[in-house]
Amino acid sequence: MTDTPPRIGLAPLFLKFLGFGCLAFGGPVAQIAMIRRELVEREGWITGARFNRLLAVMQILPGPEAHELCVHLGVGARGRIGGLLAGLGFMLPGTLLMLATAWLYVRFGVGQAWAPAFLGVQIVVLALIARGAERIGRHLLETQLLVAVGVIAFVATVMGVPFWIVLPLAGLFVSLWRTRRPASWLVLAVGIAAAVAHQSWVGSDPILAPAFAPAGDAEWPWLLLAGLKAGLLTFGGAYAAIPFTRQDLVGRGWVEDGAFLDGVAFAGMLPAPLIIFCTFAGYVAGGMLGALAITAGVFLPAFAFSLLFYERLERWVEAPGLHGLLAGAGAAVVGLIGATLIALGRAVAESVGAGDRFVALLLLAAALAFVWTLKGRWVAPAAVVLGGLAGWAAFG
């Protein structure tokens, strides 16, 4: 076996990755296992060792790693146009299905008509996000230093310090700690001063501070930028995009928390990277054009890394300073997810009647036990369906 893929035409290449996209259920682990089984074990595109190195690179970079892996393999097979076709093929089925789902949801007011069922689904999604955050944390919080960074980022975010202060300082602190420790303490002092100054001068609503646009109608350029932010800051998995997307869409009143959680639930049931929930949120906020804009923003970085830097990617990621920077930012993102989970939980609690709070807590406990003890690509869709049925029975 070599590291040179067999000769393949552009149309068969597109259809091959389109087939992967049609079967991309179960999240990134199942998706990557499927790609490995077909392209490494059955067709011998590259060696297993080469595949593992590529996967390690994709896991360090922000963005949906299964999609980035497809783009990279496509570039290796047929150059840049091959990477573009491979990436489009993999994302197309899930994108089209999510657009159709969002259209039905908005057109027929599904969220309002089936409110009790969707309330149960939203409670279950809280459990799924908690489980996703634990998995990301287990992957990213490798040392006591990174755990401390994650905790500090969590506290800072709950207090309302914006991500654009937390993430860069976390990355810089960890990068300098690994090389020049005295300078890292200076960075920490600067970060604390910046956070205090921000809170004193501006103030903010925790987790919902606007980043680049005022509240109002969602126009496609703002949604494109929201997607770019999510795509560039998604470290460790698609759940890491939740804080940034929620900040931009829910924080400006473009999408309600309930609809946002419904989008995460739908994304877990479709053959697509989980980050496709951004497409749903973009449709609710800005219609079809908004959905296409935020989707383009989310996936553009995943295309760009391999299309622009294919030859240099592995060498760059090996740089110790960059690795420390990404590790610190990733640890901070875990804290942001935890803080956002609290805000989402508070929003769901407000939707539950006072007499139903105990039942909601029981449903949440059952969902946590379900997603924590069972494994398999069927767990998330089954949890969502069971949550909907339980919500209809309990809150209907």
Image: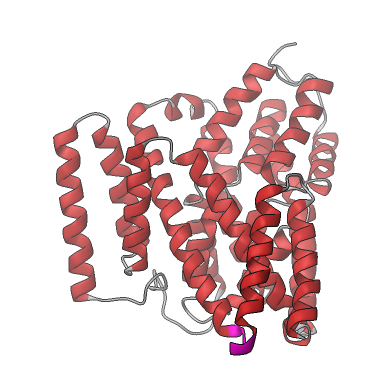
Q: Is residue 280 visible?
A: no
Query: Whole-percent x and y of residue 217?
Result: 53, 83
Question: Seen in the image, is 252 located left or right of residue 2?
Answer: left
Magenta residues span 351-355
Give the quarter of the image for residue 30.
top right
Question: Seen in the image, is 387 located left or right of residue 226?
Answer: right
Look at 71% across and 60% down and name the residue there: 267
Residue 178's place in the image compared with 369, above or below, is: above
Counting the numbered discs, the total is 0
User: Closer to the camera, 112 or 20?
Assistant: 112
Question: Seen in the image, is 328 located left or right of residue 52?
Answer: left
Query: Whole-percent x and y of residue 153?
Result: 35, 55
Query: Which quadrant does the C terminus fall into?
Result: bottom right
User: Closer to the camera, 28 or 303?
Assistant: 28
Query: Whole-percent x and y of residue 288?
Result: 69, 73
Q: Main secondary structure of the magenta part?
A: helix
Look at 24% across and 36% down and name the residue there: 176
Q: Is residue 21 visible?
A: yes
Residue 200's place in the image compared with 129, above or below, is: below
Question: Seen in the image, is 341 located left or right of residue 33?
Answer: left
User: Does residue 125 show up magenta in the picture?
Assistant: no
Look at 19% across and 57% down and name the residue there: 192
User: Closer to the camera, 395 or 329?
Assistant: 395
User: Does residue 353 show up magenta in the picture?
Assistant: yes
